[in-house]
């Protein structure tokens, strides 16, 4: 794994968590929309079985999300420690904003009051130092 792939894995995991959270929100909405039980002579229709399936999915997905959030917190902590080895405040800030805080290069340029081209150059320099300090090729 390259340095950039390692750092990008944070954003990918964060995006995956957000996608699962959206799915969980949809399932919760669906659970609130499930109709009650209808009785037709000797048959019971709808309701309980559908409700239980949705509730099971909600619980399962909640557990997956919580596990991935724990993994993300650990990954961000490890990445932050590695980024700190860069020992250049502007580069540390840049890498933290891009890979841990999820900002785009354009957003970082605006935040730092620099041109997009300058931020791209700094990004390349920061990644080179990150690679060297953390043993990536």
Image: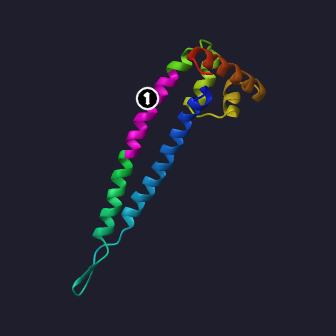
Q: Position of residue 38 (x, y in %)?
A: 29, 79
Number of marks in the rendered image: 1
Which structural element holds mark 1? helix
Note whether 10 is above or below 59 in the view shown: above
Q: Using the image as rendered, state which of residue 102 and residue 110 is in the foreground.
A: 102
The residue depicted at 56 percent of the width and 14 percent of the height is 85
What is the magenta segment's predominant secondary structure? helix
* Residue drawn at (42%, 60%) of the image: 29
Q: Position of residue 82 (x, y in %)?
A: 53, 19
In percent of width and height, residue 103 lies at 62, 33
Magenta stretch holds residue 72:
yes
Q: Quadrant of residue 109?
A: top right
Which region shows up in magenta? 64-80
127 part of magenta stretch: no
Against 25, residue 4 (above or below) is above
Q: Which image quarter is the C terminus in?
A: top right
Residue 105 position, x and y percent, is 69, 32
Q: Which residue is mark 1?
A: 74
Would you identify the image quadrant in which residue 91 lies? top right
């Amino acid at each position: 794994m390259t340095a950039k792939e390692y750092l990008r894995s944070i954003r990918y995991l964060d995006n995956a968590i957000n996608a699962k959270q959206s799915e969980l929100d949809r399932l919760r909405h669906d659970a609130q929309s499930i109709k009650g039980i209808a009785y037709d002579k000797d048959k019971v229709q709808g309701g309980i079985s559908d409700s239980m399936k949705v509730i099971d999915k909600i619980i399962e997905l909640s557990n997956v999300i919580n596990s991935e959030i724990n993994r993300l917190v650990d990954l961000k902590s490890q990445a932050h420690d590695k980024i700190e080895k860069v020992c250049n405040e502007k580069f540390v800030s840049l890498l933290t904003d891009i890979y841990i805080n999820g900002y785009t290069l354009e957003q970082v340029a605006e935040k730092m009051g620099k041109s997009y081209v300058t931020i791209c150059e700094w990004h390349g320099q920061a990644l080179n130092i990150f690679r060297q300090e953390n043993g990536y090729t």
